[in-house]
Image: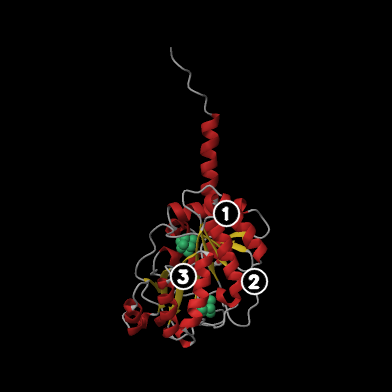
């Protein structure tokens, strides 16, 4: 299974596009004992996929000893351990070598550095380049997650990211879910002409610094619609059951969020939809962010679950065939 922990919402910078509204003034912290317990429980879950644990934030390097000990604990449980950072700490080769050397010895498998035009107002490219280079030198897989605006689609920013050696580039279009209280003009968001069809592409259990568990960490998906409950208060197996068998979750996984569109139109709420979407996640977070649409989707999921249950009862009630001689 894959599980991600947002260790804190504290960050040394405050990017405009940060949908979790992280920043220097935030103090939220997912307690280490809760993380340790959840990691132990995750290592006992039967899953076709090997255990992968990701630590993110906020900025997880701000409390480096805690990050290091959690990486070591994950590695001792046999998990593949990764983390996401903005690389602001990579101010010199000496510092980069010291910190990444310690994480490599603790068992870190991959480092993903987040960058964008928003990040680069605070973190110079040289630090991103240094962190990725040193990670590679230590045999830690290096990834660059680059968020881009519409004006940056074919820009020098993307060329720079493409030119970085020995790292895997993930280009991520800016989604219309940004820092609380901020509004970015529509022209900033890359074209949304990919439609809304398709199944949920990448749900993975994500635990926020509040303890709340979510189906994924896509921008705009920290909503009640995607919530699976308080992971600090219940066993992970219970959260995992909701993730695997929840009625909304099953529909998203088997059909995708477009399954809810007929019901939204049939109940007269088509005007709440947009004409274009940038894929299933865009539609999913749009539905989740509109209480009326989210309510319709939940009703559809409930009816679907009742229908499935009725089929099971019918099958149980049917007389067993009499064996013929
Ligand atoms: S670096 Fe990441 S966590 Fe920090 S403000 Fe920017 S997007 Fe948010
Ligand atoms: S479809 Fe929804 S639940 Fe699945 S990854 Fe996208 S936003 Fe998350």
Query: Which secondary structure, mark 3?
Result: strand
Front one among 17 and 31: 31
Where residue 260 sits: x, y (%)? 46, 57
Residue under the image location 53 percent in, 71 percent down: 102
For disc 1, the marked residue is 42
Which quadrant holds residue 40?
Answer: bottom right
Residue under the image location 43 percent in, 76 percent down: 134
Query: Which secondary structure, mark 2?
Result: loop
Q: Check the image and report above or below for 16 versus 250.
A: below
Which corner quadrant holds the C terminus? top left
**Residue 309 bears which disc, if any?**
none
Q: Residues within 10 Å of mark 1 (few under 14, many from 20)?
A: many
Front one among 113 and 200: 113
For disc 2, the marked residue is 29
For disc 3, the marked residue is 111
Residue under the image location 52 percent in, 24 percent down: 319
Q: Are marks 1 and 3 in contact (CB under 8 Å)?
A: no
Respond yes or no on whether mark 1 lies under 8 Å from ligand 2: no
Q: Residues within 10 Å of mark 3 (few under 14, many from 20)?
A: many
Marks 3 and 2, the one that precedes in the sequence: 2
């Amino acid at each position: 299974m894959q599980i991600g922990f947002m260790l804190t919402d504290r960050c040394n910078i405050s990017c405009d596009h940060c949908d979790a509204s992280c920043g220097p003034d935030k103090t939220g912290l997912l307690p280490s004992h809760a993380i340790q317990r959840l990691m132990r429980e995750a290592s006992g879950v039967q899953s076709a996929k090997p255990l992968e644990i990701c630590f993110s934030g906020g900025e997880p390097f701000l409390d480096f000893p805690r990050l290091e000990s959690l990486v070591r604990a994950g590695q001792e449980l046999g998990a593949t351990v990764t983390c996401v950072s903005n690389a602001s700490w990579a101010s010199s080769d000496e510092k980069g070598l010291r910190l990444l050397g310690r994480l490599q010895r603790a068992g870190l498998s991959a480092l993903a550095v987040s960058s964008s035009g928003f990040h680069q107002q605070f973190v110079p490219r040289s630090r991103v380049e240094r962190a990725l280079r040193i990670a590679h030198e230590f045999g830690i897989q290096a990834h660059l997650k680059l968020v881009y605006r519409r004006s940056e689609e074919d820009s020098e920013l993307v060329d720079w990211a493409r030119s970085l050696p020995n790292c895997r580039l993930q280009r991520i279009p800016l989604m219309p879910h940004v820092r609380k209280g901020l509004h970015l003009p529509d022209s900033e968001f890359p074209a949304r002409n990919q439609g809304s069809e398709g199944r949920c592409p990448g749900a993975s259990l994500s635990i926020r610094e509040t303890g709340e568990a979510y189906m994924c960490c896509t921008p705009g998906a920290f909503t009640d619609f995607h919530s699976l409950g308080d992971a600090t208060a219940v066993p992970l197996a219970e959260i995992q059951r909701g993730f695997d068998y929840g009625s909304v979750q099953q529909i998203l996984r088997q059909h995708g969020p477009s399954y809810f569109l007929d019901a939204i139109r049939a109940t007269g709420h088509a005007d709440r939809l947009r004409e274009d979407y940038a894929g299933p996640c865009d539609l999913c977070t749009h539905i989740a962010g509109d209480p009326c649409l989210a309510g319709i989707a939940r009703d559809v999921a409930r009816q679907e679950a009742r229908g499935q249950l009725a089929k099971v009862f019918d099958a149980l009630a049917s007389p067993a065939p009499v064996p013929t001689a």
